[in-house]
Structures are given as C-alpha cells and as structure tokens.
Image (cartoon, grey):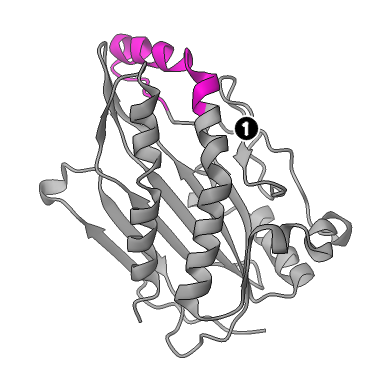
C-alpha cells in the first residue's frame, strides 16, 4: 500500500478583495511531489440540487418558489452536462498526475466496478432527503457510495463519517487502486429576493486512500452571477464555468 504525504495542509486562496466575493479556492492535504506512481479512479461524479435560500424569510420564499417552478429544466441542465463534466475531470486528472487514472465507461463498465457490491462495498440509492430534488443526477452508470437519504443537501463530506472511510477503503481494494476520487458540482444560491438573486458554481473534489482516509479535499467557488429565477440560461451560465474553475483547481493540486 502506498503512503501519501500530507502537503500544503490548508491552502485558501481568496481571488477577490475584502472577503465580499464568493470566488475562492481551498485545498486541504495533497500528494507528495516524489510519489507520482500511484493509480487512481474517479468512482463517483454527482451534480446535486441547487441549494436554495431561506432567509430573509419572505423574499427568499418568493425566490425559492419561482425557482421550483423550473425543477424539471434544472434537472435537464444537469443531465445534459454531467457526463461531459465527469469525462473532463477524469481526463484532466490523468494528464496532470501523469499516472494511470481510470474514469468514464472504461471504469464504469469494467467487471471490477460492476461487482463492487458483491465484494462488500455498500451501494446506496441515488436519492437525497430533499422533497423538491429527491433524485441525484450522476454520471452514467455511477454507483452511489454515500447515504444522502437523511440530509437535504449533499455537503456530507465536510466531516467524513466512519462508514464513508470504510466504504472507500473497500472500493480501493476491489478496484486494485491506491486512491479513489469523488466529485460534486453544483450551482448554489448566494442570495435571493423578490426580483432575482445571485448564484455561483461550486466544485468539491475528494481523494481517499486505500485505508479510506480522505487525504485531499479541494473546494472551488466562482464569482456570484446575477440570476433571475425564471431565466434558466443564467443558471446554466454558472454551471458552464466548470472547465475554467476545474483547471484552476487542478493547477493548485498538482503544482508541486
């Protein structure tokens, strides 16, 4: 089993002044510069619900109800992008790391991935405890290794429960890799009012080693964009910042 060295314990880069911006990049942990021989796999890519505002109470409620009128269109926007984004991420990690990295149909359709449940990996339904957006949008064929059924939002990995570590260790073992990657891409609401609000792109990337320990967490958010709840093209504009922000994130991870 390979050993990962924790480098750059916490790196937070605020890309706009005075803390008023939503744009930031945070990287916790890292990969030792001398250890670039480990093999990895992108085992789950999810595009969860757009987190909605609840305060101030009345304006946020008006904004939220308008957004919910477009639930089907939001889901369709995710479905149109999820496979493209997952492929983009897998290809970029393989190129930046310079090491074998499995992703996409080559991994998902492999016997090893298809047999994960039979090898002791716990697979959960692709659902979340959110009555408005109960179904997780995932890349084609992806299995879900996280229990989101009791939460309203998918930011479950901020504090890794024991079951997640155990499951990730089993996934690594079954696939014969040194680490696995999990990614979540969303467009949360930053603010909402009667006539509109703002939202931003959010990318969360997690690496787990063969013991199940999360040894790297990367978190990127874009500058907030104006968003009228009835204009889905503005929602899509936030999602389509993915490529540029992914590039920025991976430059930070693989800068050594």
Residue 8 visible within the image: yes
Specify few, some or many for label 1: CA neighbours under 10 Å numbering under 14, 14-19, or 20 or more: many
In the displayed structure, 10 sits above or below 222; it is below
Residue at 85% over, 59% down? 115
x, y percent for residue 151: 58, 33
Span of residues in magenta: 52-74
Query: In the displayed structure, would residue 248 be above or below residue 37?
Result: above
- Callout count: 1
- The image quarter containing residue 63 is top left
**Residue carrying label 1:** 128
Q: Between residues 193 and 231, which one lies in front from this camera angle? A: 231
Q: Residue at x 32, y 13 (%)?
A: 57
**In the rendered view of the protein, which quadrant contains the C terminus?**
bottom left
Please state which of residues 96 and 220 is positioned toward the viewer in this rendering. 96
Please state, as top left, top right, bottom left or bottom right, where the N terminus lies in the image: bottom right
Q: Left or right? Give the position of 246 relative to 177.
A: left
Residue 46 placement (x, y as % from top left):
57, 45
Residue shown at the point (32%, 38%) measured from the top left: 200
Percent x, y of residue 114: 82, 57
Q: Secondary structure at mark 1?
A: loop
- Residue 129: where, in percent of width, then height? 62, 28
Residue at the outermost right position = 118
Query: In the image, is 170 to the left or to the right of 31?
Result: right
Majority secondary structure of magenta residues:
helix
Whether 39 is among the magenta residues is: no
Most foreground residue, 106 or 145: 106
Instruction: Tell me: 196 left or right of 140.
Output: left
């Amino acid at each position: 089993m390979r050993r990962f060295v924790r480098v750059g314990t916490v790196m937070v880069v605020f890309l706009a002044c005075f803390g008023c911006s939503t744009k930031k990049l945070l990287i916790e942990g890292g990969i030792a510069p001398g250890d670039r021989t480990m093999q990895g796999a992108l085992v789950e890519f999810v595009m969860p619900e757009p987190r909605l505002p609840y305060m101030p109470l009345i304006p946020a409620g008006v904004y939220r109800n308008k957004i919910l009128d477009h639930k089907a269109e939001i889901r369709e926007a995710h479905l149109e992008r999820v496979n493209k984004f997952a492929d983009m991420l897998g290809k970029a990690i393989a190129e930046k790391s310079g090491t074998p990295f499995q992703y996409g149909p080559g991994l998902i359709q492999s016997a090893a991935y298809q047999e994960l449940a039979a090898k002791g990996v716990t697979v959960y339904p692709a659902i979340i405890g959110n009555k408005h957006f109960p179904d997780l949008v995932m890349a084609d064929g992806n299995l879900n290794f996280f229990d989101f059924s009791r939460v309203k939002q998918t930011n479950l990995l901020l504090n890794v429960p024991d079951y997640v570590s155990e499951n990730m260790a089993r996934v690594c073992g079954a696939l014969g890799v040194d680490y696995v990657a999990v990614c979540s891409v969303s467009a949360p609401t930053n603010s909402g009012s009667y006539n509109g609000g703002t939202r931003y792109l959010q990318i969360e990337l997690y690496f787990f080693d063969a013991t199940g320990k999360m040894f790297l967490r990367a978190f990127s958010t874009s500058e907030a964009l104006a968003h009228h709840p009835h204009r889905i093209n503005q929602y899509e504009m936030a999602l389509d910042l993915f490529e540029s922000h992914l590039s920025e994130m991976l430059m930070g991870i693989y800068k050594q």
